[in-house]
Amino acid sequence: MTLFWISTVVLVLVAIALLAITLNSKKANNDEQLRDELNKAFYKDRLSELEVENEEGLVENQQDLIDDLKQSLLDDIPQQKAQKDNVNISPMAILVPSVALVVILTYGMYMHFGGATKVKNWQEVTANLPELSKKLNGRLGRANDRRRNARSHVGTAYSFALPKR
């Protein structure tokens, strides 16, 4: 049983270590840079499309469309600094409740669904087995002695009851 508890502690510690490694690994947040590059790519693609459309004669006022495209590009730039300050959460503020949750859920679910009481009862019976075996052998031995004695008495009583010839 001790080996079981040691193994559960080791597994819980491994789970906590994986959680801590995940929370402490700093992922480079390049979302803003990727967004800017994507916006530039869309802008260049749309400019080339407008030039092709202008050459085909489909566009009446190309400069107005380019101004609209520039305005949509400017509208897509978020207020990054204000949002970033509000989202700054310490990894320890997440790690400590997560560790408590892992430990409580792990051992709580084992206590509720596991067979700890059955294992304890089994261990008690196993520990008492030699003593119970001795008692049983003692009782069986006495019962066998009584049977032998009873048979010998029956045989003697039977021999006395027979008429002598």
Image (spheres, grey):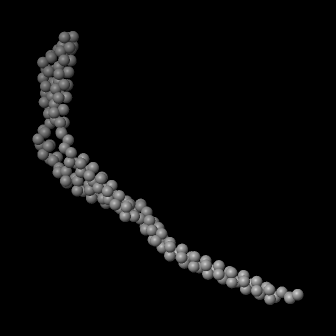
> Which residue does the image show at 81% across and 88% down from the upper left?
161
The quadrant of the image that shows the C terminus is bottom right
Compared with 7, 52 (above or below) is above
Q: Residue 17: x, y in percent?
A: 26, 52
Tell me what residue is drawn at x 21 percent, y 14 percent. 53
For image coordinates 13% across by 25% down, the residue present is 70
Whole-percent x and y of residue 119? 44, 65
Give the number of marks.
Answer: 0
Front one among 6 and 30: 6
Q: Quadrant of residue 75?
A: top left
- Tell me: 151 left or right of 83: right
Relative image position of residue 69 (x, y in whole percent): 16, 24
- Observer-nearest of 108 and 144: 144
Pick the front one: 40 or 158: 158
- In the rendered image, which quarter is residue 135 located in? bottom right
Which residue occupies the extreme front position in the image? 165
The quarter of the picture where the N terminus appears is bottom left
The residue sitting at 19% across, 25% down in the picture is 41
Residue that extends furthest to the top in the rendered view of this protein? 56
